[in-house]
Every structure is written in structure tokens, then in C-alpha cells.
Image (cartoon, rainbow, N blue to C red):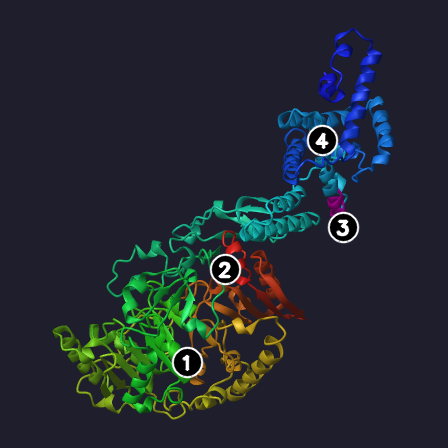
């Protein structure tokens, strides 16, 4: 009965309730009870003896009970209640209590049943809570008043905020007539504030940051609910869920990568407002996933691994469109040159190599860092001493002058290449993804150029006659077997007159196996017409090195008593290198003075700026004579870099070290960055004009690649990617979305992509990268051309909090 709800508040329990009275007296008592209840509820009364802690605790419990019922019991009536409510969110002064009480009595007497029911439910909750808290009715009433006062203050602030966002707060908050509101989001800041007061500021910094982030996310989600466009959520709300909820920004993921990308599971897919479907890669490699090297479905089907076939590329039939997760605890990479000596452990969380090679000073685990003393198997006492030892052994090598671009086979953690930067030498270092866990990934995280590759059954992805020197320090390659097929591949890429530096135990040890290998290598190199120029011992490291030189003419080849190894057929294109099987043959040395390879390039840095001598007989890419094309291209990129890229993109170049030009042409973009502390991987797509030899000729380096497949590098390799009129060509052959997924894979968090292309492609790529929650720094379109600069943000669900703290 109604009387039961108000009997305690009324305070008169004896004669009036026991005797038989008229209906008029009964109604009068009810009205008196309502009057007394509303008076105690609206007027805030503070008990001076009540501690602040008790008051806060009371407020928190009262608010939690009051705001719960509209959701649990009466969801469908929220908007109707808010319409029927009086809507006055401002607490009434004490002198106005009588007027408000009279209005309440009038509402009751007029029979506003729906509103009264709402009030009765609230009052019932208040009564039940008071009974649980204390038998002292006066204290309970005062505490209720405090709770109501705090709630009224919160509603006042919330009403202002909602109005500021351009909406009617009442209709969305679900108010009842007595002013109670649906404060699912709004009460959290109040509670957080009160808790901080009661705990005297002893809350941990982590909790504060989390609360702040949650509040930011709530505010952002609320703001987005006001407009029709649904933005991909950020922060904690960016977790990809099975179902998509556009109102609260909740996303889920159940990523499960199949052995073949054709069988990608739909349960791991999420849709954003752009209509793109993304999933998180769930390969066994996890954060280190490389699609063409981790395709175990294809690797398990190999009939043999004798020639390291399992270390070669085996790409999925369809390029993946999944997103590679970050390793837990990932931080922004350390700047160069400090990164040469140490990196964050959690960025490449692999300690096995430190256990196996730590005594050789490859890498060590030092607290939260992986440190690199600069050693290697053949130079335990440091790479710089070893580099000087090579030069002293053969002064004609002339680091940084005659020898500018080198190939380091089996590079380990690439300390050799890392220290060669001090000599103005760039090294294309490579090693397979093998039991030497993450060796190439260490190199790239250090800011040293390296790729994943293997001396197996196919040619290396480089043109012929481009490297000034090839280096192998205990690289574990059986050069002498099967007719020297692998060493003949080095002969293909080594420039005529270039050097092969071999530092390995067969050079200086006398064990039976070493003696046998040395004998076989000596015979093979003589048949290849390589000249053994020096055999030297490094006393400090207790190692030795043999230095061979490739011939500059065909005279020796013609004088051999037997054509063994055989010369390649004239129809064999020495520059063909993409998925071309190895052959045990040698290509003739060019003798025509107008042909590439007949002369040594100019010394560095002159070779960077002047067109190669052999361009006179070549046609230019852009329609002009090749030398004019070359010069115009270089001038163009110098102007673009200095006037736009360095100043107009919002890029912090102090954090840029590893750069890739995805469609390099003449290498003008890389040449324009010469004075910055960066290195550029120049990529010539396989369906573009073969200009890679020009890039090497000017003292730069690069490789061939098909952008419909994944690149041979680890995730999070590059700080900046540059693509000039590439994507519009790619989308004619393969999925543009797959290319963007690959860009996302190899680009570091906080990295940038600069794209120049036709306007249509610019818009398509912008749409895709926005769906990945990247920031658009700049977009410009004019007629049919455009430019786009986007910044890859940290958005991965579980790693967001760690990454943001690392960036502070």
C-alpha cells in the first residue's frame, strides 16, 4: 500500500493507523507524508558532526542505487519520464521550499499517476537504503539531503555540458519529475573526484591516467553520437569486437589467420564507417609476421630444404589484408646514433641471440635495453678496428671513396654495416630468417639497413655489376659446392674490378675441414679468374681475411683451358633478378666503353650528382634524353624536399632514420636527403622501367620488388615511406587495400607516408588509411593530381596505454 512507503517518514504510527478513520483522514495523512518527504529531499541539510568520508561514501552508494533502476526496470520509459518531469535541475533555496512543496501537492492531488509512480520508486529506494544504513532517522534524512545536493550539483554541470554540445540534455538523460537523471557517464567524474579527496591524493598515477583516458573516451564517444558519421574509435575503445556498436564505439576481434589467406575467417573481421573490413593477423609469428616468409602452408609442402628453400619467399596466393599487432610494451624507437648501441628490449623482445652470441659481443641484454658492443664473430673487439684492418690489408679499397656501396652477406646484427657509416659507406646487409633469432630485426631497429634474404635457389634481387665490394665474415655459405653456384651469384652482382672480402676459418685455420674448403675455394676462384690480392691476419681478433678481385676484362676467360665454370649464354640477361633460378655460369665483362660496367664510377660524392657516363645511349624515363632526365629529376626532388617535405608536412625529421622510396626511378628523392642522417631503401617495382643500375651508379642502393606481395622485412621497419605515382599503377594488378595493409605492416608507429598520385587514387588511399585511424597531416588535389601525407598513430587495442606512456 502507499501508506507503507511513507509510514516511517510520517513518524506517526499509533492511534491514527490502528483506529477506523475516514478516507478523508487517510488521504490527508498521505499528503502530509509527501510534503515532509519532499521538504527533506529538496532542502540540503548538513550535519556538522558527519565526517566528509562518511558523507562521500553515502553519496556514492545512494547515487549508484538511484541511477541503476531506469536501466534495469524501466528502459522503455526513459524518454517519457523525461517529458513528464519538471526539468528543474537547479537546487531550490530554503526560502522557496514552501512554494515548491505546494506545487508538488498540487501535482499529487491532480492524479499524475505516472510521475508519482516514478517518484515513489525513487523514494522507496531511498527508504530501503536508509534502513540498511542506520536506524537513526534524522541522520539518514540529513545524509539523503547531502546525496541529493551532490547529485543536483552534478546535474547542473551536466546540463551545461550537454547544452554546449548542441543537444537537449533532458531527452537523452532520462530525468524523472523529482530531478533524478540517468547519469551513467556523468557520475563517474564525480565519484573519481570524491575518491581522490577521501584518499588524500594517494591514488596511483596509473589509475589517474586510466581514469583520464576513460573520461576522454567517454567525451569523444558522446560527441560522435551527436553526428551521423561514425568515426573509428581510439584508445581503449578501439578494441575490435565481433559486433559493431556505433553508439558506444565498442569493437571486438576474434582474429584467426588461416594457413592460406584465401580462407581468412570472417569472425575476426570488423567494419568501420568507410566500409572497409580489417582483421588482426593471428599468424604463429605474431608481431613479427612476414607473409612471404611465414607461409607455413607452402613451406610444409616443399619436397626438399637442401638448398634453403624453406628460407626463401613463399607468398600467399592472395596478399593478406590483416593488421600486425604490436609487441607488448612497444615504445618509440631510440634516435640515431644512440640506437646503434642500444634499443628497447620490448620492441624486439628476443633474448636467445644474446645467450648464444653474447660472448662475441653481438648483443647483450642490459635491463630494459638490448645493447650492441659493436662486435661480431670475426671482430669481437669491435667493428671499427676490423674495418681499418681490411683497408690496411688492401689500401685500394678506399672506404667511402672508391668503395661506397657494399653487400654484407650473412650480416648478423649488421654491426659491420652500422660502423661503416662513419666511413661514408652504405652496406646492403642481409641474412635469412633462421635460428639466429631476429638478427635482421635487431639491425633495422638499430637504424642500420638490412633485408631478409638467403643464398638459396634464386638470384638475389639486385642488378648485375652494382656492388663495389662484397663481404662475408663467417657467413656460413658453402661457396664451393655444386660448381660454385652461390659464389657465381656473387660474381654476377659484383662490379668488375670489385673486391670480395672473405673472413672465415678456412683462411687461417688448419683443421682438416678448413684445409679442404680452402683448397676448393682456391681452385674455384682461379677458374672464375678472381685474383687473390691479399691474405692477412688480424692479431687483435685472432682471425684472418682473404681479399679477391673480380677481373675487368674477358682476357682471362678466353685463356682458360676448359669452359668451367661455363660462360652464360648471350641470351641470358644478367640484370634479370626477380624469381630467376640460379645458374652455374658467368657473364662476360662489358668491354664497350659506352656500356655500364666497363668503367669504375666517379668517387663519392661526385657520383651522386652527375649522370652516369653510359646514360648517353639510353632513353630517359620522362621522355627527354637520359642525361637531361636525370638532371631534371634530381633538381625536381631537391626543390620538393627542401620547399615542401622538410617544412610543410608537419614531420619531425629528427625521428626519421629508416626511409623507403617505394618507386625510386632515378633515386632523386634519396639523393635530395643526402645531408640528413637517414638512409633510403630505393625500390624499383618489377613493372617499372629498370632504373636500379642508375641508383647504384650514383652511390645509392635498392632492390627490385613486386608490391602485390609483401616486402622481405620485419614489421615496424621504416620511419617514412615515399610513393610517387605508384599506387595508381598497383591497383590495376592487385588489391589496393592489400598494399595499404603492407604499408601499415612495415611502417613504424608514429611513422609517415608521403603519397603523390592522381586525385582519384589519393582519395582512395586516404579513405583506407583513415579506416586504420591514421592522421591526415596534409591532403591536396589539383585537377587530376594530388598529394597526401598521413601519420600512422598508435591505435592497437591492448598496447595503446603502454605506447602513449612511452611517448610522454
Q: Is residue 566 left or right of residue 124?
A: left
According to the picture, the residue beneath numbered tag 3 turns out to be 164
* Vertical position of residue 7 compared to residue 449: above or below: above
Q: Distance between the residues labelled 4 and 3?
A: 26 Å
Reading the chain from its start, which is encountered first: label 2 or label 3? 3
According to the picture, the residue beneath numbered tag 4 turns out to be 77
Q: Nearer the viewer, mark 2 or mark 4?
A: 4
Quadrant of the frame with the C terminus: bottom right
Reading the chain from its start, which is encountered first: label 1 or label 2? 1
Question: Between residues 30 and 680, which one lies in front from this camera angle?
Answer: 30
Q: Is residue 89 left or right of residue 185?
A: right
Magenta residues span 156-163
Reading the chain from its start, which is encountered first: label 1 or label 3? 3
| Residue 571 occupies quadrant | bottom left
* Vertical position of residue 504 compared to residue 275: above or below: below
Reading the chain from its start, which is encountered first: label 2 or label 4? 4
According to the picture, the residue beneath numbered tag 1 turns out to be 421
Amino acid at each position: 500500500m502507499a501508506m507503507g512507503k511513507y509510514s516511517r517518514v510520517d513518524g506517526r504510527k499509533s492511534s491514527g493507523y490502528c483506529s477506523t478513520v475516514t478516507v478523508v483522514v487517510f488521504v490527508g495523512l498521505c499528503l502530509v507524508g509527501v510534503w515532509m518527504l519532499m521538504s527533506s529531499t529538496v532542502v540540503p541539510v548538513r550535519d556538522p558532526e558527519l565526517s566528509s568520508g562518511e558523507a562521500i561514501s553515502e553519496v556514492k552508494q545512494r547515487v549508484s542505487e538511484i541511477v541503476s533502476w531506469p536501466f534495469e526496470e524501466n528502459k522503455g520509459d526513459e524518454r517519457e519520464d523525461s517529458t513528464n518531469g519538471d526539468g528543474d535541475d537547479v537546487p531550490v533555496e530554503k526560502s522557496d521550499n514552501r512554494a515548491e512543496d505546494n506545487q508538488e501537492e498540487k501535482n499529487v492531488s491532480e492524479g499524475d499517476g505516472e510521475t508519482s509512480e516514478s517518484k515513489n520508486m525513487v523514494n522507496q529506494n531511498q527508504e530501503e537504503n536508509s534502513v540498511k544504513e542506520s536506524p537513526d532517522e534524522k541522520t539518514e534524512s540529513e545524509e539523503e539531503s547531502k546525496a541529493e545536493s551532490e547529485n543536483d550539483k552534478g546535474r547542473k554541470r551536466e546540463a551545461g555540458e550537454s547544452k554546449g554540445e548542441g543537444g537537449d540534455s533532458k531527452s537523452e538523460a532520462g530525468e524523472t519529475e523529482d530531478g533524478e537523471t540517468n547519469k551513467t557517464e556523468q557520475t563517474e567524474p564525480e565519484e573519481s573526484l570524491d575518491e581522490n579527496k577521501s584518499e588524500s591524493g594517494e591514488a596511483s598515477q596509473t589509475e589517474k591516467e586510466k581514469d583520464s583516458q576513460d573520461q576522454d573516451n567517454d567525451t569523444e564517444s558522446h560527441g560522435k553520437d551527436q553526428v551521423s558519421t561514425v568515426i573509428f574509435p581510439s584508445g581503449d575503445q578501439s578494441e575490435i569486437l565481433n559486433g559493431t556498436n556505433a553508439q558506444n564505439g565498442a569493437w571486438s576481434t576474434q582474429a584467426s589467420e588461416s594457413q592460406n589467406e584465401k580462407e581468412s575467417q570472417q569472425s575476426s573481421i570488423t567494419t568501420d564507417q568507410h566500409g572497409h573490413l580489417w582483421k588482426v593477423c593471428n599468424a604463429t609469428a605474431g608481431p613479427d609476421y612476414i607473409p612471404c616468409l611465414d607461409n607455413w602452408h607452402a613451406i610444409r609442402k616443399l619436397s626438399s630444404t637442401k638448398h634453403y628453400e624453406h628460407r626463401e619467399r613463399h607468398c600467399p596466393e592472395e596478399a593478406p589484408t590483416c593488421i600486425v599487432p604490436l609487441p607488448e610494451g612497444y615504445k618509440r624507437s631510440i634516435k640515431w646514433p644512440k640506437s646503434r648501441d642500444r634499443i628497447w628490449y620490448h620492441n624486439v623482445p628476443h633474448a636467445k641471440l644474446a645467450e648464444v652470441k653474447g660472448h662475441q659481443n653481438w648483443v647483450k641484454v642490459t635491463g630494459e635495453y638490448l645493447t650492441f658492443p659493436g662486435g661480431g664473430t670475426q671482430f669481437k673487439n669491435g667493428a671499427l678496428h676490423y674495418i681499418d684492418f681490411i683497408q690496411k690489408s688492401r689500401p685500394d679499397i678506399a672506404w667511402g671513396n672508391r668503395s661506397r656501396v657494399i653487400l654484407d652477406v650473412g650480416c648478423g646484427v649488421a654491426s659491420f654495416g652500422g660502423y661503416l657509416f662513419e666511413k661514408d659507406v652504405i652496406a646492403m646487409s642481409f641474412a635469412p630468417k633462421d635460428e639466429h633469432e631476429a638478427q635482421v630485426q635487431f639491425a633495422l631497429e638499430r637504424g642500420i639497413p638490412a633485408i631478409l634474404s638467403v643464398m638459396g635457389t634464386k638470384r638475389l634481387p639486385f642488378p648485375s655489376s652494382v656492388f663495389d665490394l662484397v663481404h662475408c665474415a663467417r657467413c656460413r655459405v658453402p661457396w664451393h659446392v655444386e660448381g660454385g653456384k652461390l659464389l657465381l651469384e656473387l660474381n654476377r652482382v659484383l662490379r668488375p674490378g670489385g673486391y670480395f672480402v672473405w673472413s672465415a676459418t678456412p683462411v687461417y685455420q688448419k683443421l682438416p675441414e678448413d684445409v679442404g674448403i680452402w683448397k676448393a675455394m682456391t681452385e674455384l676462384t682461379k677458374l672464375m679468374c678472381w685474383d687473390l690480392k691479399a691474405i692477412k691476419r688480424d692479431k687483435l681478433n685472432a682471425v684472418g681475411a682473404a681479399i679477391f678481385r673480380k677481373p675487368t676484362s674477358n682476357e682471362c676467360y678466353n685463356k682458360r683451358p676448359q669452359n668451367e665454370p661455363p660462360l652464360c649464354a648471350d641470351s641470358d640477361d644478367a640484370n634479370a633478378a626477380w624469381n630467376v633460378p640460379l645458374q652455374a655460369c658467368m657473364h662476360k665483362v662489358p668491354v664497350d666503353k659506352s656500356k655500364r660496367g666497363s668503367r669504375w664510377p666517379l668517387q663519392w660524392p661526385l657520383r651522386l650528382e652527375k649522370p652516369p657516363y653510359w646514360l648517353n645511349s639510353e632513353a630517359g624515363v620522362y621522355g627527354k634524353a637520359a642525361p637531361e632526365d636525370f638532371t631534371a629529376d634530381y633538381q625536381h626532388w631537391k626543390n620538393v624536399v627542401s620547399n615542401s617535405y622538410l617544412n610543410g608536412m608537419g614531420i619531425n625529421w629528427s625521428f626519421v632514420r629508416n626511409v623507403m622510396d617505394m618507386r625510386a626511378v632515378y633515386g632523386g628523392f634519396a639523393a635530395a636527403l643526402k645531408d640528413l642522417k637517414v638512409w633510403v631503401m630505393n625500390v624499383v617495382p618489377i613493372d617499372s622501367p629498370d632504373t636500379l643500375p642508375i641508383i647504384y651508379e650514383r652511390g645509392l642502393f635498392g632492390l627490385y620488388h613486386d608490391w602485390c606481395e609483401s616486402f622481405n622485412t620485419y614489421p615496424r621497419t621504416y620511419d617514412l615511406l615515399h610513393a610517387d605515382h605508384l599506387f595508381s599503377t598497383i591497383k590495376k594488378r592487385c588489391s589496393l587495400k592489400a598494399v595499404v595493409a603492407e604499408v601499415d605492416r612495415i611502417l613504424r608507429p608514429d611513422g609517415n607516408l608521403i603519397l603523390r598520385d592522381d586525385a582519384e587514387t589519393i582519395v582512395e588511399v586516404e579513405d583506407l588509411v583513415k579506416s586504420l585511424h591514421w592522421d591526415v597531416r596534409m591532403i591536396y588535389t589539383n585537377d587530376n593530381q594530388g598529394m597526401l601525407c598521413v601519420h600512422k598513430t598508435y591505435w592497437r587495442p591492448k598496447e595503446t596505454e603502454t605506447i602513449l606512456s612511452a611517448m610522454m
